[in-house]
Image: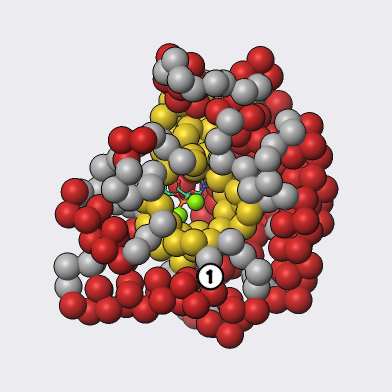
């Protein structure tokens, strides 16, 4: 009987695996074609200086969107994981980085591009170097966002970080405080900024939450790097991150991610803004 159950267990497992593999293969096939078909784009979310929101965005975060022909516009939650598992993230990431650099040129403003841990290597440094050169971006105008998970080997990570900074990019650590990196490791890395994860931003009214956020911003201050609050959804949260001394803020309260063309058109409509490089796309 035990043998029977074991065999049945195997059958069930096989079926699940087959379904999963079929779906995976489908998304993978879709993904590969979608990259070639230009179905991916970047939406841009504005980043402001707290207290000076009226002055306009000081930078933008680029967020991937898949304009799927049947499924509509898909957020990264539904494809980045598959792309990472299949290895296609490198091809996709390279493609998105190119678009992000072109947007930085068109907007004449810093653009932050999210980079997966699997892309965080010397090939990325080469791509970044070429793109900064191609679009004649100013130092710091291309910002690479990595999560703590990109730092598996601190020595190797440091080499990549140095290469990126030498090329003229900035590096910000995304979702700071949600990973498992130690402070010792963090303080040994040369980065330009930290993004305070929105879970901290949403908990600033509790004594405990305020204390933790104060500690994190203290670390940023000790390292002399900038701190960006993400996920600011209310006027109250905006006030509190200002009190914390965050250098920049981002969130639905200030603006949702929007198609890049909207932002480029908006800037073009402002007479005092000189649009640089808008001929490039
Ligand atoms: P992230 O880099 O932390 O990006 C911020 C996410 O929070 C975005 O979700 C953004 O739309 C959302 N967000 C912005 N403001 C608010 C707010 O006020 N409240 C709330 N609740 N959410 C807010 P999105 O676009 O779905 O992206 C999710 C994640 O996918 C990103 O998190 C990033 O880790 C990843 N991702 C996005 N684009 C790329 C990409 O081009 N490459 C890679 N490797 N990952 C990407
Ligand atoms: Mg990010
Ligand atoms: Mg983030
Ligand atoms: Mg996040």
User: Which residue is at 46% across, 72% downward?
Assistant: 221
| Residue shown at 38% from the left, 47% from the top | 49
Nearer to the camera, 63 or 25: 63
For label 1, the residue is: 224
Give the residue furthest to the front.
272
Q: Is residue 78 above or below residue 68?
A: below
Tell me the residue at 17%/67% (across/down): 205
Give above or below for 268 relative to 134. Answer: above
Q: Say which quadrant the C terminus sits in.
A: top right
- Horizontally, residue 205 falls left or right of residue 129, namely left
Q: Position of residue 18 (x, y in %)?
A: 59, 50
Measured as percent of width and height from the top left, residue 232 is found at: 29, 51
Mark 1, ligand 3, within 8 Å: the answer is no
- Residue 114 x %, y %: 57, 49
Task: Determine which quarter of the picture holds residue 130.
Answer: top right
- Please identify the residue farthest to the bottom as the structure is shown: 184
Q: Who's the residue at 46% across and 20% down the image? A: 272
């Amino acid at each position: 009987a035990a043998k029977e159950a074991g065999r049945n267990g195997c059958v069930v497992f096989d079926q699940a695996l087959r379904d999963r593999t079929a779906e995976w293969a489908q998304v993978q096939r879709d993904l590969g074609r979608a990259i070639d078909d230009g179905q991916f784009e970047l939406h841009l979310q504005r980043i402001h200086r707290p207290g000076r929101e009226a002055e306009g965005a000081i930078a933008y975060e680029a967020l991937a969107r898949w304009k799927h022909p049947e499924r509509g516009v898909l957020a990264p939650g539904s494809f980045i994981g598959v792309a990472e598992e299949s290895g296609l993230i490198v091809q996709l990431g390279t493609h998105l980085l190119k678009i992000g650099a072109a947007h930085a040129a068109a907007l004449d403003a810093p653009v932050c591009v999210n980079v997966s841990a699997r892309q965080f290597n010397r090939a990325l440094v080469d791509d970044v170097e070429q793109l900064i050169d191609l679009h004649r971006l100013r130092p710091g105008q291309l910002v690479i966002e990595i999560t703590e998970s990109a730092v598996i080997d601190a020595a190797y990570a440091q080499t990549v970080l140095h290469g990126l900074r030498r090329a003229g990019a900035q590096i910000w650590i995304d979702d700071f405080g949600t990973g498992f990196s130690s402070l010792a490791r963090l303080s040994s890395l040369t980065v330009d900024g930290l993004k305070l994860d929105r879970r901290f931003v949403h908990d600033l009214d509790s004594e405990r939450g305020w204390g933790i956020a104060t500690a994190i911003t203290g670390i940023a201050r000790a390292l002399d790097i900038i701190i960006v609050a993400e996920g600011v959804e209310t006027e109250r949260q905006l006030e509190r991150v200002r009190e914390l001394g965050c250098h920049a803020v981002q969130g639905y309260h200030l603006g949702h991610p929007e198609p890049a063309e909207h932002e480029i058109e908006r800037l073009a409509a402002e007479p005092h803004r000189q649009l640089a490089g808008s001929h490039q796309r």
